């Protein structure tokens, strides 16, 4: 059995661990987009949004339990959802089966 790669990068995990108990930050959840057509890259934005909808109940329940809120009303066509939460909530979200990865929501600056 091979081990799964971590859903949170070591760098992001380090920043999460540095947060205070009540501090929150924005994170991007990459949801699993179950579809046979994803592999062919021929799916519609609406299909992606519909196929990720079942994950929202678990996400919202986790955010309610640990504190935080979902900032996206639905997933974007690639399955991304933005949340604002503390380290315990973000770590718990990473443990959900429908979450493939968790990334820090960072601003992008021109080089």
Image (spheres, rainbow, N blue to C red):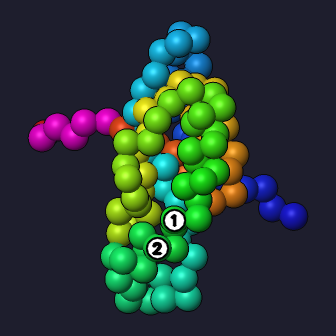
From the image, tell me which residue sits under label 1: 53
- The reply to whether dot 2 and dot 1 touch (C-beta < 8 Å) is yes
Q: Is residue 58 left or right of residue 72?
A: right
x%, y% of residue 64?
A: 59, 34
Which residue sits at x=39%, y=85%?
Answer: 43
Q: Is residue 78 visible?
A: yes
From the image, tell me which residue sits under label 2: 50
x%, y% of residue 86?
A: 53, 24
Q: Is residue 53 left or right of residue 97?
A: left
For the magenta stretch, what is the residue range?
106-110
Q: Is residue 91 visible?
A: no
x%, y% of residue 98?
A: 63, 60
Q: Is residue 36 magenta?
A: no
Helix, strand, or loop for circle 1?
loop
| Count of numbered labels shown in the rendering | 2
Locate the N terminus and report the quarter of the image it occupies: bottom right
Q: Which secondary structure class fits the magenta region best? A: loop
């Amino acid at each position: 059995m091979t081990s799964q790669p971590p859903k949170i990068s070591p760098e992001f995990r380090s920043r999460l661990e540095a947060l205070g108990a009540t501090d929150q930050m924005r994170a991007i959840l990459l949801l699993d987009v179950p579809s046979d057509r994803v592999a062919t890259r021929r799916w519609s934005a609406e299909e992606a949004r519909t196929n990720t909808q079942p994950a929202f109940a678990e996400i919202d329940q986790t955010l309610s339990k640990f504190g935080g809120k979902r900032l996206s009303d639905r997933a974007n066509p690639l399955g991304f959802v933005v949340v604002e939460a503390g380290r315990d909530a973000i770590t718990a979200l990473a443990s959900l089966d429908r979450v493939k990865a968790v990334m820090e929501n960072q601003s992008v600056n021109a080089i």
